[in-house]
Image (cartoon, helix red, strand yellow):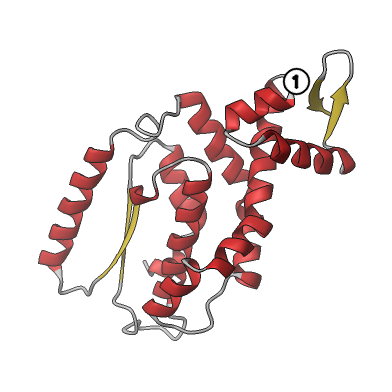
Amino acid sequence: MCSGRVDLKFILRAFLNGLDGVLIGACKLNECNYVTHGNYDALGNTYLFKKIMERIGLNPERLRIEFMSGADGNLLAEVTNDFVKQVKALGPLGKSEGLDEKSLKSKLEAVNKLVPYIKLVERERLRVPVKSKEAYHQFFNGDEANRLFDELIGDKLSISQILLLLRESPLSTGKISEMLGLNPSEVSKHMNSSSRHGFVRYDESQKCYALA
């Protein structure tokens, strides 16, 4: 299968199923057999998902992409062994990041709900025009990509997490802030936005937010 078909959903599904790490094997860059150069799409998705992992509190080193040819059997074995050692050192998914099973699942589900939107944003605003490893590295590690991620994805990801929490019970701004590691001012901003869109309401009697 072409690495270009490794959808964000595939990576997410692996983590939702409890895997501690994901290794993507792709053809060498600039040696693609197809005009689409799908391995660059895989590289872009890897960079993007690493940013998502950082945002929800998971170690991005749990995800790796490596480029090799069909004749690189020894390299495949070396890379796989190295990645397994790395993941073992990181420990079980979530636990070494200080997340219990319930919090981990909630954060991953929040991402899952946004995947169609994230894919649209990636296609329209986060595509790198130059097909080179250096160009992708510079773009996704640059200030502009970080700004776009925060503006287009980061806030919506925080709101998605908040709405999942409110599905279980009403919560105060302070409690939401504590559970998600957000500043109270950020939570207030997200609640004001969600309230305007009719997603949440403020319960005066309990002094907390609830789903509308």
Question: Can residue 119 be seen by looking at this rendering?
Answer: no
From the viewer's perspective, is 22 left or right of 122?
left
From the viewer's perspective, is 71 left or right of 131?
left
Question: Residue placed farthest to the left in the image?
Answer: 74
Q: Residues within 10 Å of mark 1 (few under 14, many from 20)?
A: many
Locate residue 125: give its quadrant: bottom right
Amino acid of disc 1? Pro
Q: Position of residue 197 (x, y in %)?
A: 87, 43
Q: How many marks?
A: 1
Residue at 72 percent of width and 38 percent of height = 185
- Looking at this view, is 199 or 37 the one in front? 199
Q: Position of residue 117 (x, y in %)?
A: 67, 56
- Looking at this view, is 144 or 209 the one in front? 144
Q: Position of residue 7 (x, y in %)?
A: 49, 59
Residue at 30 percent of width and 74 percent of height = 27
Q: Quadrant of the N terminus?
A: bottom left
Q: Quadrant of the C terminus?
A: top right
SS for tag 1? loop
Placement of 153 over or under 17, stated as above or below: below
Question: Can residue 60 be seen by looking at this rendering?
Answer: yes
From the viewer's perspective, is 4 left or right of 174?
left
Residue at 62 percent of width and 51 percent of height = 154
Residue at 14 percent of width and 66 percent of height = 75
Q: Position of residue 204 (x, y in %)?
A: 89, 18
Placement of 44 over or under 14, stated as above or below: below
**Residue annotated with mark 1:** 170
